[in-house]
C-alpha cells in the first residue's frame, strides 16, 4: 500500500471517528492485510473467470461440432429417404403406366378380334351365298 493511500485512510478515520492513528498502528496493519487478501482474492477470481470462460468456449465448440454432425446425419438420412421414396414412386408410376398400356392393348386386341370374327362370318356367309348361287345356276343350266 503506498503512503498516499495510507495517509488518506488515516485522515478519513480521524475525521469520521475522531481517532488519530500512526503508520505503525496494528489497525492499519489489519487494513493492509485485508487489502492484500482482497488483491489476492481478485486475482484468484480473475483466474477462475478465465478458466470458466475457456471451459465454456470448449463446451460451446464441442456442442457446435456435435450439432453439426447430428444435423448432417439427419440431412443425409432425409436425402436417402427422399431418394428411396422417389424410386418407389417412380416404380409405382411405371407399373401403373405398364398396366394402363397392357389394358389398352388388350382392349384393342379384343376389339380387333371381334371385328375379325365378324368379317370372317360375313366372308363365310358370302361364300355360302356364292356357292348357293353357283348351285342354282348349275341346276338351271342342266
Image: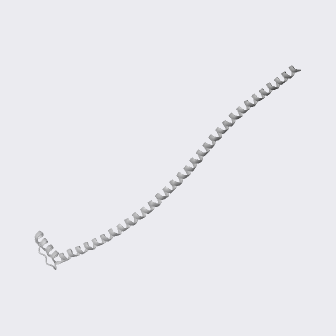
Outermost front residue: 141
The residue at 46%/57% (across/down) is 71
Residue 6 is left or right of residue 73, and the answer is: left
Picture layout, residue 26 above or below residue 142? below
**To which quarter of the image does residue 61 belong?**
bottom left
Residues 101 and 80: in front is: 101
The residue positioned farthest toward the top in the image shown: 140
Measuring 87% from the left and 21% from the top, which residue is drawn there? 141
User: Where residue 132 appears, x then y in whole percent?
Assistant: 82, 23
Q: Residue at x 47, y 61 (%)?
A: 69
The total number of labels drawn is: 0
Tell me: 29 left or right of 50: left
The image position of residue 85, as x and y in percent, is 55, 49
Q: Residue at x 37, y 65 (%)?
A: 57
Where, by quadrant of the figure, is residue 32 drawn? Answer: bottom left
The quadrant the N terminus occupies is bottom left
Residue extending farthest to the right is 142
Left or right, residue 112 beside residue 17: right
Instruction: Please tell me which residue lies in front, 58 or 122.
Output: 122
Q: Is residue 36 or residue 89 the one in the foreground?
A: 89
Where's residue 135, x and y in %?
Answer: 85, 23
Amino acid at each position: 500500500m503506498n503512503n498516499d493511500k495510507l495517509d488518506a485512510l488515516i485522515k478519513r478515520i480521524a475525521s469520521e471517528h475522531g481517532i488519530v492513528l500512526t503508520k505503525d498502528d496494528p489497525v492499519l496493519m489489519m487494513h493492509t492485510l485485508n487489502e492484500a487478501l482482497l488483491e489476492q482474492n481478485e486475482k484468484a477470481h480473475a483466474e477462475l473467470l478465465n478458466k470458466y470462460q475457456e471451459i465454456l468456449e470448449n463446451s460451446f465448440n464441442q456442442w457446435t461440432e456435435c450439432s453439426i454432425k447430428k444435423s448432417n446425419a439427419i440431412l443425409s438420412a432425409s436425402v436417402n429417404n427422399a431418394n428411396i421414396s422417389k424410386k418407389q414412386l417412380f416404380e409405382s408410376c411405371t407399373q401403373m403406366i405398364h398396366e394402363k398400356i397392357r389394358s389398352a392393348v388388350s382392349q384393342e386386341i379384343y376389339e380387333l378380334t371381334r371385328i375379325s370374327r365378324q368379317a370372317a362370318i360375313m366372308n363365310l356367309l358370302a361364300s355360302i351365298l356364292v356357292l348357293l348361287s353357283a348351285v342354282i345356276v348349275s341346276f338351271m343350266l342342266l
